[in-house]
Image (cartoon, grey):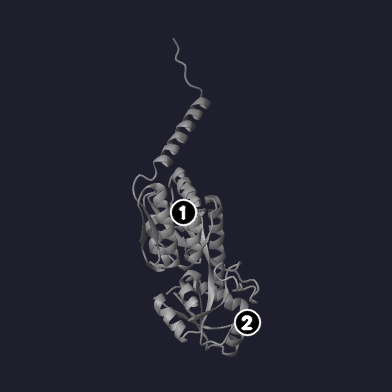
Amino acid sequence: MTRRTMPWWRKGLVLCSMLAASASAVAQSYPSKPVRIVVGFAAGGSVDVLARIVGQKLGEIWGQSVIVENRVGAGGNIATEVVAKSAADGYTLLLHTSAIAVNVSLYKNLPFDTQKDLTPVMTVGSTNGVFLVPSSVPAQSIKEMIALAKTQSGKVSYATTGNGSSGHLFMALFMTLAGVEAVHVPYKNISQMYTDLISGRIQMSINTLPGAIPHINSGKLRALAVTGSRRAELYPDLPTMQEAGVSGYEASTWYGAFAPAGTPGAVISRVHGDIQRLLGMADVRQRFAAAGLDPQGDTPEQFAKYFRNEIAKWANVIKATGMQVD
């Protein structure tokens, strides 16, 4: 009696069915314990605000605790390293700003490979930068600020939260396109930066909109323009930099979700799908708008391609300006 063996093609079908069933089981059981979202910046900042909105909603959807963990330092690199070296099981996620694309070129000898050690999940949100001046500065528009900076070349200063920060990059782009020079004053403490800006010790700054809202609304700082391609929903009368006369200017801060490389595709799909779902909720969109944030949403593949392009874009800016970290 001969023993009949299963044809190779049928074995392949059985294996594919088993893998599909296994992936489905993983997605259905995830998460079965608390999930942490690691953020590389201090509590109260724009990415922290976004992470807590997303974390709360994911916790409700999943029926599990979602803990936001602030691992501050090195431009967000400490948080990136934590996630890059975590287990690839979906229980440690990273929510980072567009600084993660800048850091690839800005920092030398990073203890991880950003593109190899992380899996892009999606773009969660974005926000405009806003060009700010203290009330003591007479400029009422970007054109007037450019004229002032040119007549007082070398005497006008601008504040940022450090070398290589988004504010530093955005201002470098502005000075290049507008043909002006100004003195860079980097701060490690954002509260002190705002104190000196409001007092008039510093004449201008570009910062993310969420952190600037209270100072704009109080009248302590004057907003001249937003840096993105579209006007901010909160301040519809505020022009974009291009509308204000700086041709070719477009820069915004985006916020992306990442997982450790090797995280099962089914888990990535679950995280992506549930974040996409919450971004469509009316209360989430209201909370985003109040914080000066715009909900986004794309596929993991689209985000991965965009992320690669962002790395290349800022690598060119860093090379052209000779920018270095402290």
Q: Give amino acid for label 1.
A: Lys
Looking at the image, residue 137 lies above or below residue 217: below
Write the residue at 55% across / 62% down: 310
Q: Nearer the viewer, residue 264 or 133?
A: 133
Q: Residues within 10 Å of mark 2 (few under 14, many from 20)?
A: some
Residue 143: x %, y % from top left: 63, 82
Above or below for 97 versus 117 = below
Question: Is residue 230 at least partly visible in the picture?
Answer: yes
The residue where tag 1 is placed is 116
Which residue is drawn at the image coordinates 58% and 85% (left, top)? 139
Tell me the element at label 2. helix
> Which of the 4 image quarters holds residue 29?
top left
Looking at this view, name the residue that lies furthest to the top: 1
Local crowd size for mark 1, using a 10 Å CA cut-off: few (<14), some (14–19), many (≥20) = few
Of labels 1 and 2, earlier in sequence is 1
113, 271: nearer the viewer: 271
Residue 45 placement (x, y as % from top left): 42, 68
What's the residue type where badge 2 is placed?
A: Lys
Identify the residue under disc 2: 143
Nearer to us: label 1 or label 2 = 2
